[in-house]
Amino acid sequence: MIDDLDLGFDEPERGEKGRHRRGFRKRKGGSGGGGGGRGKTFLALLMALLLLGGIGGGAFYGFDRIQNYFVTPDYDGSGTGEITVEIKNGALLADMADALVAADVVKSQKAFIEAAEANSRSKNIQPGTYKLRKQMSGASAVTAMLDLKNKIVNGLTIPEGRTSLNIYKLLSEKTKIPVKDFQAAAKDPKALGIPDWWFTRGDGKKSVKSIEGFLFPDTYEIPPKSTAQSILKLMVNRFLSVTVEMKFADRVQEERKVSPYEALIVASLAQAEAGNKDDLGKVARVAYNRVYGEFDCNCLEMDVTVNYYLESIGKPTKSSKQMTSAELDDPKNPYNRKLRGMIPTPINNPGKQALEGAMDTPVGKWLYFVAIDKEGHSEFAETYEQHKRNENKAREAGII
């Protein structure tokens, strides 16, 4: 038993009342007594260490874990080598720390979080891909991520109103991913994250599930090694985030009395037809009035729908003057301008302002519009007679 060990210390003498005397009693033996005491002490310590060793290496492991509660595990210095780490959209400090620990950039989540909390600029760390080093201190990692030189910039701006095919071409030029890969990925909108309810229609027409309309126009940071599917998912997710924030689906059903999909189609029409952002809402109102109002044919009669069909079958688009009657009124064209009711799908990918125009349309009975100036502003009319007068204004201005 350890209680039986003589650890080499002499017990102090006690007086009659059991109090310690000021000094230790003299050791037995002569001048060699000191050496014997040191030998006994060494032996006792050795035996104690052996006993601790008998408990097992787990004792030391346990001590190391306990120590971590008091000392933040961290690397020293600015690290070595080079590694890329992606910080995803919406990542919190803890998420960033997890990504850095997984890549062995920092030693612990705690090291990065403490360093970030100590740096007031850490809130400026943005999603994206960073060039970092392995085994950096938490403070070095924070500093490196705040230096824009270490951020891999691979941004691409998708303008409003582009068709999906046009977007695939832009993406292919930027990423070198073939257009056919984007087309293949787009065949399954559900796999890209679009919920089935988005394709529900309230006009009784058959639902056509298309990616058109859901590729939100924005500037995107495209991570290295992205696939066609991952890029399209990124754009769809942005669309869903924006429309949820706008309460688009709820408002168009409550206020416009149409399904979100039909309102998305209207937003795409407004995006294509409005020559100026100020007219987006009015053009959307014309589309609603023509299809769901008292327009003679309850059809759109918009040339842009015909052009969308031409592009989809690989033919060049045309101006209104160039289109023949056969092309405008082709019964085989599901986007025929005389088609009764709303067309099957959106004809492009509208931006936020066009979505707002389709959701929050101004009140008006307009059925016609025509551009009257070089800035793209239009005049709107309720009757064909008014529209003819507006067309004369456009001719005088040299617009048509």
Image: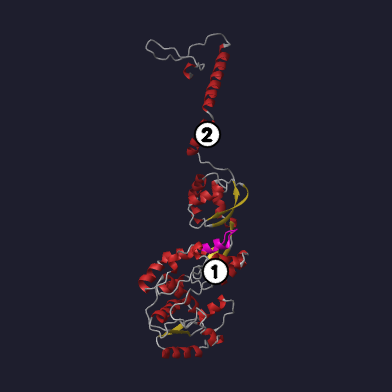
Give the alpha-carbon distance from disc 1 to disc 2, as whole Å.
Answer: 54 Å
Q: Label 1 belongs to which residue?
A: 158
Residue at x 54% of width, y 42% of height: 74
* Vertical side of 340 occupied by 113: above or below: above
Above or below: residue 233 compared with residue 94: below
Residue 385 placement (x, y as % from top left)? 42, 91
Disc 2 packing (10 Å; few <14; some 14–19; many ≥20): few
Residue under the image location 38 percent in, 10 percent down: 16
Query: Crowding at label 1, few (<14), some or many (≥20) Cα neighbours within 10 Å?
Result: many
The image shows residue 56 at horizontal and vertical percentages of 53, 28
At horizontal 43% and vertical 85% (from top left) the residue drawn is 368
Which element type, helix, strand or loop, lies under badge 2?
A: helix
- The amino acid type, in three-letter code, at marker 1 is Ile
Q: Position of residue 287 (x, y in %)?
A: 43, 79
Give the quadrant of residue 289.
bottom left
Range covered by the magenta-colored residues: 221-234
SS type, badge 1: loop
* Circle number at residue 61: 2
Q: Earlier in the sequence, mark 1 or mark 2?
A: 2
